[in-house]
Image (cartoon, rainbow, N blue to C red):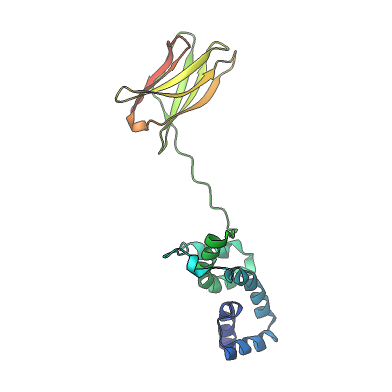
Amino acid sequence: MTDRHDELRHSLGAYVLGQLDVDARQEIEEHLATCAACRAERDELAPLAGLLRTVDLDALEAGLAPPPELDRMIAAALPGPTRRRARRWAPALAGAAVGVAATVGVMLVLPEDEPPPAPPVIAVKSVEAVQGVSATAGLVDHTWGVEIKLEADGLPAGETYEMWVVGNDGTKHLAGEFVGVEDKKIVCDMSSSVLLRDAARFAVVDTQGKEVIAADLDS
């Protein structure tokens, strides 16, 4: 009896999708009339099945398939007692669920993964500055270019400064500008489209073009 009960529960996904023949459907309905656990599981499956019926299969892209981790993510998103049951039916409906999301814009609310770790900041070994100014810098190697994290003390208030990154080929690329603040440490992030491996140095210049902060980059 237990084995038959389990077989009927395993058929609930096909039942809510209307994929059973008349005899199998009748057997499921007779079982549902006497089994509260299977009725509860049917009620969990029914909303998703309703969404799947709206999918235009001809509109789905060829080769569209759910990611291999979708089963685990769906199961993890469900409340505790439901997770064990979810492992049986989630794989059968996962491919169709992806089709629903792609075709009609249905959002699958899945648990958020841990955010990716921040890229490391590479300390610039030696940063030169004019008298009265001190500075440190760190580099972040991005796929789109280099980010320069600058901290500086002693820059005159109200003065405008530009940062330039010089490539290995001698070309100069503007990375941004900032204004000095009285009695405040300047903390700013500058970005350049030059990749770190192609960058030779950076320089901060005042409005007369004089370098006030500069460093060679070990790229």
Count of numbered circles in the view: 0
Q: Considering only vertical position in the picture, is 38 above or below 149?
A: below
Q: Position of residue 96 (x, y in %)?
A: 52, 68
Q: Position of residue 218 (x, y in %)?
A: 33, 27
Q: Residue at x 64, y 73 (%)?
A: 46
Q: 186 or 162: which is nearer to us? A: 162
The answer to whether 23 appears left or right of 191 in the picture is right
The answer to whether 101 appears left or right of 129 in the picture is right
Q: Position of residue 98 (x, y in %)?
A: 52, 63
Tell me the quadrant of the picture where the C terminus can be found: top left
Q: Considering only vertical position in the picture, is 88 above or below 199?
A: below
Q: Residue at x 52, y 67 (%)?
A: 94
State the image quarter where residue 25 is shown: bottom right
Q: Is residue 154 visible?
A: no
Q: Considering only vertical position in the picture, is 172 above or below 142?
A: above
Q: Is residue 30 visible?
A: yes
Tell me the quadrant of the picture where the N terminus can be found: bottom right
Q: Position of residue 27 (x, y in %)?
A: 62, 89
Q: Residue at x 57, y 70 (%)?
A: 52
Q: 206 or 121: which is nearer to us? A: 206
Q: Residue at x 37, y 31 (%)?
A: 196
Q: 93 or 68: which is nearer to us? A: 93
